[in-house]
Every structure is written in structure tokens, then in C-alpha cells.
Amino acid sequence: MRFTAHTIANFLGGTVEGNSEVEVTGVSKIEEGVSGTLSFLANPKYENYLYTTKSSIVLVNQELKLNKPVGCTIVRVDDAYKAFASLLELYQQSKSEPVGIDKMSSIDDTAQIGENVYIGTFSVISKNAKIGNNVKIYPQVYIGNNVVVDDFTILYSGVKIYEDCKIGKNCVIHSGVVLGADGFGFAPQENDEHKKVPQVGNVVIEDYVEIGSNTTIDRATMGSTIIRKGAKLDNLIQIAHNVEIGERTFIAAQTGVAGSTKIGKNCLVGGQVGFSGHIQIADEVKIGAQSGIQSSIKEKGAVLQGAPAISLMNFQKSTIVFKSLPELRQEIIRLRNEVEQLKKRT
């Protein structure tokens, strides 16, 4: 689809500086801009590219002051990043979407299928599954017995959903995700043997959740493993049995959450963070990448980093000391030698 600067400004409630009739048909990064594309500038570090970019239209914040002439048309908005996200959503919606049920999919006679559903090649819908309206199920998705997938949810190719799991409305589940595999439960027996503990719960994904590729969320031993409304999980995350992730919490890639841990709402978790089991994390907590969380965090809004995690301020102070350890060691050796010399003299 083609959009003019005038159309974009009207849609975003912005103002145009330059040729209001210039058209764009795609998007690009400002540093890699080409004619006929739209870019945005939100981070001041990229301002220099504004004066050299080949993009036809660039979104900028209202308060930005130009230091040089620009060759593109500018659309000023309150928040360039949010405005660009809105345009990307509009651009995505303009693309044609798949419809219909492929004849090579397998749908059990007891399954309930809603209206305007897409089910791709080699997908399997098992007994008593319920698929809502406007759901899109891409090729090679497996949906187990009694699974519920609510309206407007998207399951990309290769998603596997075990029996009894429930997925809410407007969710996006990316390729390779596994929902409802057994939790890691084994009871020690005599002679150093271990007996598998049956995992009879399920996984519940509430509305507006997005789960990245190859993330795994284990079913509960009893009850439910729950991902609350609006939570966003990156790729390659492991969520163990009976974990609960709060509303609108964001978790970056390669994080692992051990069993029965509860993470509050509006938390931000960096990549490669490890959570011990059976702990609770307060609301609005921020945790830096590669941190280790061994005990509960009770302070709302705490900011932590390190393994084991400590307050960000203390972590930064400790990092400075850690970097100086070789010099400090040499200083200690020197002082020790001086003390030995003084002892010999006395």
C-alpha cells in the first residue's frame, strides 16, 4: 500500500515539514534508508543519520531541533517510537492474510471450530478442542485434547500444545513453542532411584500474551502454570511447573524460572536470568541480564543485578572494586613485604 506524508500525519495527529505529497511503500532503518521508505528517529544517538538518510519520510519528536538542512520530509509527532509502532501495525494489517482450512489438516469430529479460522497444512486439532473465531493456525501445529484457543489468537508453524491447556484472546505464539510438557518432577526412591511424579495440571495463557520462538512452559503438577494478561516472553525461555508470571511482565531471552516461583506484574527481566524455585517477586521489579535470583524479592520496584542479585547501586560499586582487584592485590603484597621488613628491623 502507498501512504503520503499528509496521510501519515493525519493518522498520527502530526505535522508535516516538507513535501506533504511524497509517498512511501515500505519502511527502513534511518541509517539504511532508501527512497520510497519511512523511517523514524527516537534515539538522539542516531540524529546524524537524519541529515544523510535516503528515506523519503522520517518521523521525529515534536521538540527535535534541526541543526542542518534535511533532504527528507519530516513528520513531527509526540512520540516517534510509538507512532512508528502504530504505523507498522497498520502496515502489517494491510498485508493479505491466509484464510480457510487446508484439506491436509486433521480435525477431530468432536473439535469445535469458530468462524473465519485459518488452519494450515498438516496441523492437528485433537478431540474436544475448541478453536475461537478469527484464529490463525499455521502449518504443522499440534493441538491436544480439550485445548481451548480463544478468538484472534495466532499460532505459528510448529507450535505444540499439550492436552487441557487454555490460551486466551489476541495471543501470539511463535514457532517452536511447547505449552504443557511435563514439569520436571521426580521423587527420590530407595537404591538411589527416582520415580517420575505425574504432572496432572495444565498451562493457562491469558489474553494479549506473546510468547517467542522455542520457549517452553511446563504444565503444573496440580493446578495451573499461569501467564497473566499482557505478559510478553522472548525466545528460548524455560518456565517450569506451577510458575505464575504477572500481568504485563516482560522477560528477555534465555531466562529460566524454576518451579512454583511467582513473578509480579509490570516486572522487567533481562536475558539469561535464573530464578530459584518457590520464591516470590514483587510487582514492578527490574532485574538486569545474567542475574541469579535465589530468594524472594519483597520490595516493589526494586532494581537488581548480579549473581546472587543485589541492588543495582551496590552491584555497580562492586564492579568498580572487582575491576581493581589485580592492582589491589599487588598493593597488598607490597604492603605485606614492607611490614615484614619492618618486623626484621625491630
Image: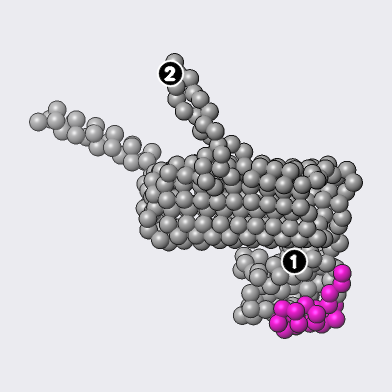
Question: Image height check: is 140 above or below 262?
Answer: above
Q: What element does badge 1 sit on?
A: helix
Looking at this view, is 38 or 234 the one in front? Answer: 234
Residue at which label 2 appears: 190
Mark 1, residues whose alpha carbon is within 10 Å: few (<14), some, or many (≥20)? Answer: some
Q: Does the magenta stretch include residue 256?
A: no
In the displayed image of the protein, which residue is found farthest to the front? 110
| Horizontal relation, residue 249 to residue 310: left or right | right
Q: Can I make out residue 301 in this image?
A: yes
- As drawn, 171 above or below 20: above
Q: Position of residue 163 (x, y in %)?
A: 66, 42
User: Which amino acid, mark 1?
Assistant: Leu
Give the residue drawn at x 86%, y 57%: 99
| Part of the protein shown in magenta | 1-22
Q: Which residue lies furthest to the top in this view?
A: 191
| Image quadrant containing the N terminus | bottom right
- Determine the residue positioned at 37% across, 41% down: 325
Q: What residue is shown with label 1? A: 88
Q: In which quarter of the image is residue 41?
A: bottom right
Distance (Cα) linking label 1 and label 2: 59 Å
Relative image position of residue 197 (x, y in whole percent): 52, 31
Query: Residue at the spot x=70%, y=82% of the render?
Result: 13
Q: What is the residue that sits farthest to the right in this orientation? A: 103
